[in-house]
Amino acid sequence: MKSSSVKCARLVMLCAVAAVALAALLIPASMGAFARDGTLAQNTEATRARQAAQRLGVPPADLVLVIRAPERSSSAPAQAAHKVVSVLARQPGVRTAWSEGRQEPTPRPASTADVVVMAALDGEFRDREETAERLVKRVRAAVPAHTVHPSGPSWTLGRIDQRIESDLLRAELLAAPVVFLLLLLIYGSLLSALMPVLVAAVAVSCTIPLLGGLAHFVHISSFAVNAALAIGFGLAVDYTLFLLARYREELAEGLPPSRALTTAVRTSGRSVGFSAAAVTACLAAITVVPVPLVRALALAGATVTVLSAVAALLLTPACVILLGPLCERGDPFRRWRRTRLGQCSPFWQRTARTVTRRWALTGGVALAVLALLAWPVTQLRLGIMDYRIMSPSSQVATAGELARSVPGTPEQLLTVVVTGQVSAHQLQDYEQRLARVRHIDEVRVATRATGRGTVLLAMTRARAGSSQATSLVATVRALPAPGPVLVGGRAADVADTLTSATRALPWALGWMGLGLTLLLGFFTRSLVTPLKALVIAAASLGAGAGAMVVLFQHGAGRGPLGEFTVTGSLDMSLLMFTLAIALALSVDYEVFLLGRIREEYQRSADNRAAVVEGIGRTGRLMTSAALAVAISTSAMITSSVSVIKMIGTGIAIAALIDAVLVRGVLVPAVMTALGTANWWLPTAKHRHPRGTTVADAGREKENNLTQV
């Protein structure tokens, strides 16, 4: 290597070390900037109802305490509740505290086993979370003979995020040695296997402070950061693997190291750039969904993707230049290895020949398998995550179920705000009509401000997110009222969020399709290939989504994947994120495969030969990359949080299906069927990429063979 190249490589490594050191200093402060909420859509009727009720003196309950008296105790729970309310009212950070039934005309019976105390807290969400933790300790000390079960958003979301952070750390520690052995097997060198680890470390460490700075301007939840960082390692493996594989391939062709590296960066590096752009486009498209968590997931995922690509394009060549021949040494599997990284795979080459000869049969079988896997998507039901994402045996899930079983908790209330000037007779008549609505058990007046409005609380046992709750919200909103009405509460929040997401989904898919079509069209210089890629990606995506419906919505995965609560729905935000990542990986593999096939087509002008050679050169690489992604994400199955299990399982299944069944069978079958139409552009005369027509290139090839 030239001395100038060595100097540049050293400068790149020094900059990487400085970036990681600076990031390490900023990470502690950055972690405190992330939010913990964001699962509900903003600017909905339920949001406006909550704000209106708060202005009228009925704030939402941030902390819910279910107080259970000990067995065979003579003390009434109501007395304990009164004491707890007094203790909470004196604590800093508490706006107001009350026990369930404070508006009831008669006190609760002394024989009631459980009583509920609720509190509204001041400050931002993290302030309320810290206040809730302090209050629970004070309450337990105030009533030591009673059992206190805390729930509510300020308590529950904090416990969930803490569990997710510890589970993801454990999953990474479990997956790290397995993935490293796989990388050692793939790369055939200890130092080469460490390259993606270096790339991932730089990308992930720089992502956290960057997102921490953005969190001061936009909503970014710690959940989104944790989920996105878990994907960063898989992308780092992909990008580094394809760069190093092309470098070794060029070395095997007899090129000197400097030219081999230049060729690898020019070809595979171009694919890395387009792949990162495609992943970013997929994630950017879902930001049209007006749910803060979805947007945070998209922003965090796009950030780690861009940084992974930049780190791979800078650090991989620098490592190759500085290490030189050491990159090829230290292979513990040399004795059993038949082919090395970068060499054509005989297995995938034979598979491609078989598929291209019988493209109708093999393509039809692949489509039938994908259709069978995708069929359960027709039964997909979307929902919003709550305490049930935790293990059924956890304290959070136990407290959540207990709070839901006691009347008057936020999970069971619809907040109906009647605005404007309303007479007592009109209000009473409306209250009676409201009480007669199906699934409403009781209606009471929470507060009434003359001339400003009235807040009614309607109790229901319909679980938020169920068809009964959704129908109930629609019925209450359609009920004739004496003035303008806003309907809120947990059931309304869930219904409005799902409605907003469903309305935005076609726009997200449209922008995603447009972005990918433009990127792939520019990459392949073809109009047909991008459309074909989108159709095939949709089939692959449907298969992955169908697997998630069967495993998590229907509960078939309970047991093999660990214990979790089957809610009968899939969380909307994390399902969209999982499918966006799965689509991005699909496009990622498509970009590398198409890039190689296009190179071969430019050389030979033979579409079938280009497909066979492209599959032979990239099949083993894509399978290895998908296997690395599957291992690193499937370790998330060990989490006790069901949505983390879903993300890990969904991405692992989608990556393996796409790399093996789709890229190995369906893509070569479809490209063989399309023939030269793969490279069609709406021009007057279809020309070969080198400038001659395809027919001229074919005749030139035949003449060369004849001369030989």
Image: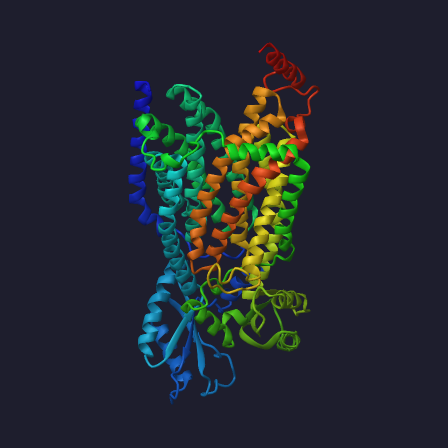
Reply above or below: 141 against 359.
Answer: below
Instruction: Give residue 330's position: percent from left, percent from top.
Output: 31, 34
Is residue 346 toward the left or the right of residue 394 in the image? right
User: In terms of image quadrants, where is residue 234?
Assistant: top left
- Residue 489 visible in the picture: no
User: In terms of image quadrants, where is residue 677?
Assistant: top right
Instruction: Give residue 443's position: percent from left, percent from top.
Output: 58, 76
Instruction: Give residue 123's position: percent from left, percent from top.
Output: 39, 60
Q: Name the residue nearer the viewer: 526 or 356.
A: 356
Name the colour scheme.
rainbow
Q: Quadrant of the C terminus?
A: top right
Residue for point 31% across, 29% down:
326
Residue for point 35% across, 66% down:
133
Q: How many marks?
A: 0
Instruction: Give residue 365's position: percent from left, percent from top.
Output: 65, 44
Q: Name the residue nearer the viewer: 159 or 426.
A: 159
Q: Name the residue nearer the viewer: 427 or 286.
A: 286
Q: Which residue appears farthest toward the front when viewing the image? A: 335
- Residue 394 visible in the picture: yes
Q: Quadrant of the N terminus?
A: top left
Residue for point 32% across, 19% down:
4
Reply above or below: 40 against 504.
Answer: below
Is residue 609 toward the left or the right of residue 98 in the image? right
Q: Name the residue nearer the viewer: 474 or 325.
A: 325
Q: Which residue appears farthest toward the top when viewing the image? A: 707
User: In terms of image quadrants, where is residue 486?
Assistant: bottom right
